[in-house]
Image (tube, rainbow, N blue to C red):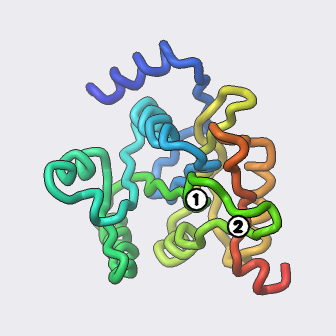
């Protein structure tokens, strides 16, 4: 396949080292973190193409306007209307029921831009957790770590519904992962954990 060939060439010349646990063989929510740079998307494509994982990702509808639409969809994009976000879950469930195997790439740590003051709490977006629970899909932990110049896929885990316990496992995995821009890294924590007194 052309994508795998391109990925082989990329990894041959890249300064990054690809390290990965076995690629998931069933539909999974694929977390991309720490998400600190637009280059993360390139790395994720290179990982997926090298490992032969079909990927889907969510993007705001405006990204799919005009000539960009066919390109974004060819790269696995699924447009999301802000006023009808619940449709995304239905579409993902439909793809799973149709037998499609894919990784739904989600970057829960939000914006890559400048963070607020250090005293201001910044949380991961909870969409990945909700989608995984509502669809029954496991979560695969993808990562970028500039300190070791490695990237790839970590373990695949099923969420239990115990948010704090699930996030403790996720935090443990990402504890030593710095991202491409370490100063923009966000601690894996959902606001619901704080609300629950965790």
In this view, the residue in front, 182 or 132, is 182
18 lies left or right of 13: right
- Which quadrant of the structure image shows residue 58? bottom left
- Residue 128 percent across, percent down from the top left: 54, 67
- Residue 60 percent across, percent down from the top left: 35, 64
Could you tell me which quadrant the C terminus lies in? Answer: bottom right
Relative height, residue 5 to residue 103 (above, below): above
- Residue 8 percent across, percent down from the top left: 42, 20
Q: Which residue is mark 1?
A: 139
| Residue drawn at 58 percent across, 59 percent down | 139
Task: Return the residue found at the far bottom.
Answer: 196
Relative height, residue 196 to residue 9 (above, below): below
The residue carrying pointer 2 sits among few (fewer than 14), some (14 to 19) or many (20 or more) residues within 10 Å by Cα, namely some
Q: Which mark is residue 122?
A: 2
Label tally: 2
The residue carrying pointer 1 sits among few (fewer than 14), some (14 to 19) or many (20 or more) residues within 10 Å by Cα, namely many
The mark closer to the camera, 1 or 2, is: 2
């Amino acid at each position: 396949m052309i994508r795998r060939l391109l990925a082989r060439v990329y990894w041959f010349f890249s300064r990054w080292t690809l390290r990965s646990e076995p690629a998931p063989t069933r539909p999974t929510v694929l977390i991309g973190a720490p998400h600190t740079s637009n280059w993360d998307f390139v790395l994720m494509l290179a990982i997926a193409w090298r490992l032969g994982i079909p990927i889907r990702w969510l993007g705001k509808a405006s990204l799919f306007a005009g000539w960009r639409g066919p390109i974004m969809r060819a790269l696995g994009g699924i447009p999301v209307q802000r006023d009808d976000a619940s449709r995304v879950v239905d579409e993902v469930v439909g793809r799973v029921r149709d037998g499609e195997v894919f990784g739904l790439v989600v970057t829960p740590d939000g914006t890559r831009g400048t963070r607020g003051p250090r005293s201001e709490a910044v949380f991961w977006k909870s969409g990945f957790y909700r989608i995984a629970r509502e669809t029954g899909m496991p979560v695969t932990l993808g990562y970028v770590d500039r300190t070791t110049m490695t990237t790839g896929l970590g373990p695949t885990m099923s969420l239990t519904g115990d948010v704090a316990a699930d996030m403790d496992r996720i935090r443990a995995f990402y504890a030593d992962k710095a991202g491409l821009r370490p100063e923009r890294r966000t601690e894996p924590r959902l606001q619901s954990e704080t609300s629950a007194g965790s």
